[in-house]
Structure formats: structure tokens, C-alpha cells
């Protein structure tokens, strides 16, 4: 929906469709009706703004599944109506003007943006391209190269960068929608009467430096290398090429529509949209409505690769964490590795020196759980070798020193949570928190429900995952939980291929060609070949009499091939 009112001679059209003002059918109709009202009222200019927390944050993704996005007026028709408005139009952008929201703003003659706002065209993450003129207008506004970068990466821009590129005409201090709308109305009042033809983005010429063939040949090759098997980035380049080559803007739009339809009908878009909705469902845990406990400090037991990465997760969010290991040498090595990782980010411009110092100050070390710093933690994450008896011994120690109400979590990737919890007198406070390696980078966190885990415990680890910036999913207690349960067969077959004569690169290369970051053998090598070996030795009943596991995996581990984490050759 949208509401119109006249403020002096300036019309204000405010979109209201909580929570993110998605451009569903009712909103689209409201915008068209609002433009007509502004023209009837004789407004000298029209400001388009979002009510609540944001300017329209994109199309209504749910409409893609039902075909509702094709119901008139379509988003493209709404944008065409804005493009041909008889008065100057101003987009008042606050919050997140993404996807269709930014395409609406591009059709306006002017764009006023909050200093805290972000904008972007992230359709590539849904296996699509901007399908309402974004591939045609954005290059005309800011140039082909930056437009392609924005659309193929899907990354949002801040206001300062948007202004530098020419995407935002004015950046204002206001953060809330009311303040930005008020500033945009003032901006519109100062405009001359009538539409300046040079401000109509669709009418602007598009020149390509270096020639069309050379530029787009290089752009498509760059997109191909970065796309890792995805089609959408390549077709985005093709759509921008149409903007440069088509005999008219309308012909370019037609080509954009063809390419959008090709992607929308393909398996890539369906899969990525499934992921989009699934990732929004995982945080909604049925039956867990207890309030989470506050987590103001943590302790991580085990200074290996995983323990160090998990400690970084807490430090990155300003949560004090104690890294515990009985070996002073292991602690010294891991702290050095953590500092080196942060310094590498400083060198790349991703982290300031001040933040490096603040994060390192969040991390302290201890060689025993008897250290006073360990007894005050709100949450413990055990991250030692994947051996059941070792983990049970640590949980027995934690049970003795942890304060009442502290959460006792295990980073096990496969072991039975209930067996680990049996070593304590408080199984209600025990659950799994399975981070994926490298823990400070990988977004997935499997929180594992034990049979006695309380609702408060589960609510707390789910909230913790969100605080750490993870995609936290609640898993049941079974072998491998979710991720490793799926991956076990995948890895098993990769070793069978080696036994049958393949070399590692021949196994991994086709998987990378599909878009995965690495193949199964490289993944196992990086994680540590000893992990799978220990799991199989600890759980001899994992495979039935008719099952067979490749002998090669165990032979490599027994020969000392632990992988890069302990500088020993593996796969």
C-alpha cells in the first residue's frame, strides 16, 4: 500500500507494507495510484519514501513461486510510470534499498540517501538478474564497469560510496524514514519546475570505453572466473551489453526480460531461492520459546585449529573469551596464528589496527580449568580431539568448576551428545555447538539438541549463533547431525575413486567446476584426516557387516598424514 499527501507544492508518496515494504501487488498499485494523485493535485515534484524501517527492500520474493510478480501492474510497468512522470521525482532512501527497491529509485530523477542507508542489486544471490530495468539504467547512471561489479557481486553499497559513484545525489544526516523524507521534500522544493531531460536515466547515452567487443569479452571472462559455475553473473554481463548495443532503451529492456525469464525457469534460480527461504526458516524453532540467558563471557577448551577459530568468533563480537589448553606451547602457537590472521586482514584493509588490538585483548589464555578466569564463564565450548572418552573427561571437569546456569557445549561433529552429557550432573545445560572449519569464517553453526537439553539452553545457543553472525540451525542428536551425516557418504565415495585409480585432482576438479570452493579430498585434508579416522575407531558399530569403508583413508592417517593443520601430508 502507499499513501499520498501534498506538502506545500511537493507530493509525498509513502510506501507502507511492513516489515520491509516489499514491492508486492498492493504496493505496486499504490505507487501507480499515488503518481496519478500527484499529477491531479498539480504537485511540482513527487517524493517517494518508505514508511517504517526502510525504503522498499526489494520485490516480494514469494510472488516468484506463484507467478504473482507478473500480475499487473508489474514492477517494470510501475517503474516505466515513474520514468515518464510529468514532474520531477525524488527517491528518499533509508534503510536498505535493495533489488527492486533500487530499481524504483533508479527510475526517479533524483536520489536522496540517508548516511546510514545501503543500496544494491543482490538478485544474483537468487540465481536471477535485476529484471525491472536495473541492468539498463545502472550502467547509464554510473558506467558499465562499476554497474557490472555491483550486480555480479550482489554486495550492498553504503551511502558514501553510492554518492561517489553518482548513484546518490545527496546524502543526508537523518537516519529514520521521517527525517529522510523531510529532507527529500526540502530537496524537491528547491528544484526547478518541470522535468530536466538530462535527469531521465533511461534517456542517457551509454558509451563503452575500449570498444564493446573488448570490454564485454573481458567482463564476461572475469565474471566466469568469479562465478564458479553460476549462470546469472554471465547473463548480467550479457544484459549490460544489450544496454550498450540495443538500438533503443526499450530493446535493451526486452533483452533483459528474455535473460531474466531464462534464469527464472532454470534450476539455479529455484535452488538458490529454496536456500533463501530455508535460511530464514532455520531460526524459527518450534517449541522453544524460553528466554535466552545472557552470554557475556566464554571459554574455549582446546587450542587447536577449531578452538582458535571459535575463540576468534567471540572476540570478533567483543565477547571476552578464555582459550584453555594444557600445553603452553599450543597456546602460544595458536595466539600467534590468531594475531597473524587479524594482521592479514589489516593488510588487506578489512580491519583497523584499533580493532585488531581490541579483539586480541578479548582473548586470554589458561593452561587449566582451575584458572579463576574459567570458573566465571557463561558458556563453555569444548573443542578437543574427536574422542568420546576425552570429551567426557573434560565435561566432568567442567561440571565441577562451572557456575550454576553456565552452558556446557561440545564442538563434536559426530559424537552422541547424550553420552557426553552423562559425565555431568546437569545434562539440561549441555548441548552441541558444531562450528565448521575455519570457524571464524564459515557461517554455518549446528546447535545440537540432547535428550535433556532445556528450552532455555537451546534458546541461548540459537541467540548466541545470531550474535556471532552465524546461520544457526538446530539439529537432532544422531551420527553426524546434518552436515556431516550428508557428507560422510560423499567422502567415502571419494576414497573409493582413489582406490580405483583416480588421482586426487581428478576427484576434486569436477566438484570445483560445479561451484564448490573445494573438492572432498581437499576438504578432508584441510579439516584433518585424523578426524574421520578417530570417528571410525571410536564408533566401530558405525558400519554394518555388509558395509565397507575404503582402507586408504585409515592407511593415510596411520602413516602420519594429518594434513596441513599439523604440517603433515595428506590428500
Image (tube, rainbow, N blue to C red):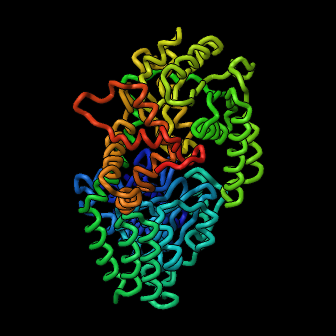
Residue 279 position within the rendered picture, expressed as x and y whole percent measured from the top left? 40, 43
In the rendered structure, the answer to whether residue 486 lies left or right of residue 211 reads: left
> Would you say residue 569 is visible in this rendering?
yes
- Out of 115 and 146, give the one closest to the viewer: 146
Above or below, 260 against 387 in this view is below
Give the residue at x 59% y 60%: 158
The picture quadrant where one finds residue 129 is bottom left
The picture quadrant where one finds residue 506 is bottom left
Residue 490 position within the rendered picture, expressed as x and y whole percent measured from the top left? 33, 45
Give the residue at x 52% y 88%: 209
Residue 235 position within the rendered picture, expressed as x and y whole percent measured from the top left? 35, 72
Give the residue at x 55% y 56%: 94
- Out of 75 and 446, give the one closest to the viewer: 446
Above or below, 430 against 499 in this view is above
Above or below, 402 against 114 in this view is above
Residue 534 position within the rendered picture, expressed as x and y whole percent measured from the top left? 46, 31
> Would you say residue 459 is visible in this rendering?
no
Give the residue at x 36% y 25%: 540
- Out of 370 and 59, give the one closest to the viewer: 370
- Out of 418 and 470, give the one closest to the viewer: 418
In the rendered structure, the answer to whether residue 174 lies left or right of residue 77 reads: right
Amino acid at each position: 500500500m502507499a499513501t499520498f499527501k501534498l506538502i506545500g507544492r511537493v507530493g509525498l508518496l509513502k510506501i507502507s507494507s511492513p516489515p520491509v515494504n516489499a514491492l508486492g501487488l498492493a504496493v505496486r498499485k499504490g505507487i501507480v495510484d499515488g503518481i496519478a494523485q500527484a499529477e491531479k493535485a498539480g504537485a511540482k515534484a513527487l517524493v517517494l519514501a518508505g514508511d517504517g524501517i526502510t525504503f522498499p527492500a526489494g520485490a516480494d520474493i514469494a510472488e516468484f513461486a506463484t507467478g504473482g510478480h507478473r500480475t499487473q501492474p508489474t514492477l517494470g510497468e510501475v517503474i516505466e510510470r515513474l520514468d515518464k512522470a510529468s514532474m520531477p521525482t525524488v527517491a528518499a532512501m533509508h534503510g536498505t534499498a535493495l533489488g527492486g527497491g533500487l530499481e524504483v529509485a533508479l527510475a526517479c530523477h533524483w536520489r536522496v540517501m540517508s548516511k546510514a542507508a545501503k543500496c544494491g542489486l543482490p538478485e544474483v544471490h537468487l540465481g536471477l538478474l535485476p529484471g525491472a530495468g536495473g541492468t539498463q539504467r545502472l550502467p547509464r547512471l554510473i558506467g558499465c564497469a562499476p554497474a557490472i561489479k555491483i550486480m555480479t557481486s550482489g554486495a550492498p553499497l553504503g551511502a558514501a560510496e553510492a554518492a561517489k559513484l553518482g548513484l546518490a545525489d545527496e546524502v543526508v544526516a537523518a537516519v529514520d524514514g521521517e527525517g529522510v523524507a523531510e529532507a527529500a521534500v526540502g530537496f524537491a522544493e528547491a528544484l526547478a519546475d518541470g522535468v530536466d531531460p538530462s535527469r531521465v536515466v533511461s534517456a542517457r547515452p551509454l558509451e563503452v570505453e575500449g570498444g564493446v567487443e573488448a570490454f564485454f569479452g573481458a567482463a564476461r571472462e572475469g565474471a566466469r572466473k568469479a562465478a564458479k559455475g553460476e549462470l546469472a553473473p554471465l547473463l548480467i554481463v550479457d544484459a549490460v551489453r544489450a544496454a550498450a548495443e540495443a538500438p533503443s532503451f526499450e530493446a535493451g529492456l526486452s533483452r533483459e526480460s528474455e535473460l531474466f525469464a531464462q534464469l527464472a525457469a532454470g534450476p539455479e534460480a529455484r535452488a538458490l531461492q529454496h536456500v533463501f527461504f530455508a535460511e530464514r526458516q532455520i531460526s524459527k524453532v518450534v517449541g522453544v520459546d524460553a528466554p535466552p540467558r545472557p552470554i557475556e563471557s566464554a571459554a574455549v577448551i582446546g587450542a587447536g585449529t577449531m578452538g582458535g577459530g571459535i575463540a576468534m568468533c567471540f572476540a570478533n563480537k567483543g565477547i571476552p573469551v578464555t582459550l584453555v589448553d594444557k600445553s603452553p606451547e599450543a597456546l602460544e602457537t595458536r595466539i600467534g596464528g590468531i594475531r597473524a590472521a587479524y594482521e592479514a586482514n589489516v593488510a588487506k584493509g578489512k580491519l583497523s589496527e584499533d580493532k585488531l588490538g581490541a579483539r586480541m585483548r578479548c582473548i586470554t589464555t589458561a593452561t587449566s580449568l582451575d584458572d579463576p578466569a574459567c570458573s566465571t564463564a557463561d558458556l563453555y565450548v569444548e573443542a578437543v580431539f574427536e574422542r568420546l572418552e576425552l570429551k567426557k573427561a573434560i565435561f566432568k571437569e567442567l561440571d565441577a568448576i562451572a557456575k550454576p546456569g553456565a552452558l556446557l557445549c561440545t564442538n563434536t561433529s559426530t559424537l552422541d551428545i547424550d553420552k557426553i552429557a552423562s559425565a555431568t550432573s546437569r545434562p539440561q545445560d549441555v548441548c552441541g555447538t558444531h562450528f565448521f572449519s575455519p570457524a571464524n569464517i564459515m557461517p554455518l553453526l549446528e546447535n545440537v539438541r540432547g535428550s535433556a537439553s532445556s528450552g532455555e539452553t537451546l534458546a541461548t545457543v540459537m541467540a548466541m549463533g545470531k550474535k556471532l553472525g552465524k546461520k544457526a540451525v538446530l539439529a537432532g542428536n544422531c551420527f553426524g547431525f546434518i552436515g556431516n551425516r550428508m557428507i560422510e557418504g560423499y567422502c567415502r565415495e571419494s576414497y573409493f575413486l582413489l582406490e580405483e585409480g583416480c588421482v586426487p585432482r581428478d576427484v576434486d576438479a569436477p566438484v570445483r567446476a560445479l561451484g564448490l570452493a573445494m573438492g572432498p579430498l581437499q576438504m578432508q585434508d584441510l579439516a584433518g584426516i585424523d578426524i574421520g579416522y578417530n570417528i571410525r575407531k571410536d564408533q566401530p558399530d558405525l558400519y554394518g557387516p555388509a558395509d565397507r569403508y575404503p582402507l586408504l583413508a585409515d592407511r593415510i592417517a596411520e602413516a602420519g598424514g594429518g594434513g596441513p593443520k599439523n604440517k603433515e601430508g595428506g590428500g
